[in-house]
Amino acid sequence: MSSDNVTIRAARADDLNAVRALLTDAHLPLDGIDEQFGDGYAVAESAGQVIGAEGIETYEDAGLLRSAVVHDAWRGRGIGDALTRDRLDWARSRGLREVYLLTTTAADYFPRHGFSRVDRASAPAAVQRSREFAEACPDTAVTMRLVLQSQQRT
């Protein structure tokens, strides 16, 4: 299984079941994915099979990175990095100012993409009302933030 034949592309509606299966296998939350799946999601595909996914939900000028998952057999090949770069580029192209995430397992992974730990209460109110923040992730999850654009005041 070479990662040379992996394509990162925008998710389509018919990818939802495959993404759900990946998340379930990785013991990651499904809460809210049915409502949020769409434009903010990308998948990694090889030989017609979805082998990874990641999404950014938008809340005003902030994003919430979630559902970052790569099939066990494909981990360690840079697919997660490619998905994260793709989604952060997507967030920048949408004019998002910052991106948050919650994690119970990957707090050491995301700093390579510029994320740093922050207090959960520092996230914007709209992000805190998301299903991911309000229901899916435990209070013990690490909250991380990446600033994409500085806010300019006139």
Image (tube, helix red, strand yellow):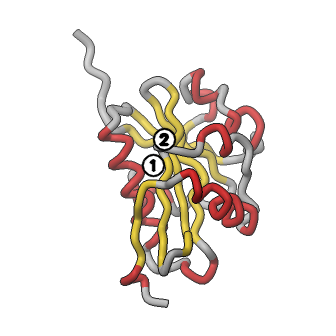
Q: Residue furthest front?
A: 14
Q: Say which residue appears at 74% left-offset and 44% top-offset.
A: 31
Query: Is residue 10 shown to the viewer in this render?
Result: yes
Q: Is residue 58 above or below residue 31?
A: above
Q: Is residue 39 above or below residue 62?
A: below
Give the amino acid at mark 1.
Phe
Please state which of residues 138 and 86 is positioned toward the viewer in this rendering: 86
**Disc 2 and disc 1 in contact, CB within 8 angstroms:** yes
Q: Position of residue 121 (x, y in %)?
A: 63, 28
Give left or right: position of 129 versus 60.
right
Please state which of residues 150 and 87 is positioned toward the viewer in this rendering: 87
Q: Say which residue appears at 51% left-offset and 62% top-offset.
A: 109
Give the amino acid at mark 2.
Arg
Secondary structure type for disc 2: strand
Q: Is residue 152 above or below residue 82?
A: above
Q: Is residue 122 above or below residue 109?
A: above
Q: Position of residue 113 (x, y in %)?
A: 40, 56
Q: Position of residue 128 (x, y in %)?
A: 64, 28
Instruction: Determine which of the numbered discs, if any, sits on residue 115 in the image.
Output: 1
* Label whose residue precedes the other's in the sequence (2 or 1): 1
Residue located beneath label 2 in the image: 145
Q: Say which residue appears at 50% left-offset and 33% top-offset.
A: 58
Instruction: Determine which of the numbered discs, if any, sits on residue 25 in the image.
Output: none
Secondary structure type for disc 1: loop
Q: Bin the neighbour count of mark 1 within 10 Å (Cα to Cα): few under 14, some 14-19, many 20 and up.
A: many
Write down the quadrant of residue 6 in the picture.
bottom left
Give left or right: position of 148 versus 73.
left
Query: Is residue 117 shown to the viewer in this render?
Result: no
Q: Say which residue appears at 41% left-offset and 65% top-offset.
A: 8
Q: Position of residue 102 (x, y in %)?
A: 62, 46
Q: Bin the neighbour count of mark 2 within 10 Å (Cα to Cα): few under 14, some 14-19, many 20 and up.
A: many
Q: CA distance from mark 2 to mark 1?
A: 5 Å
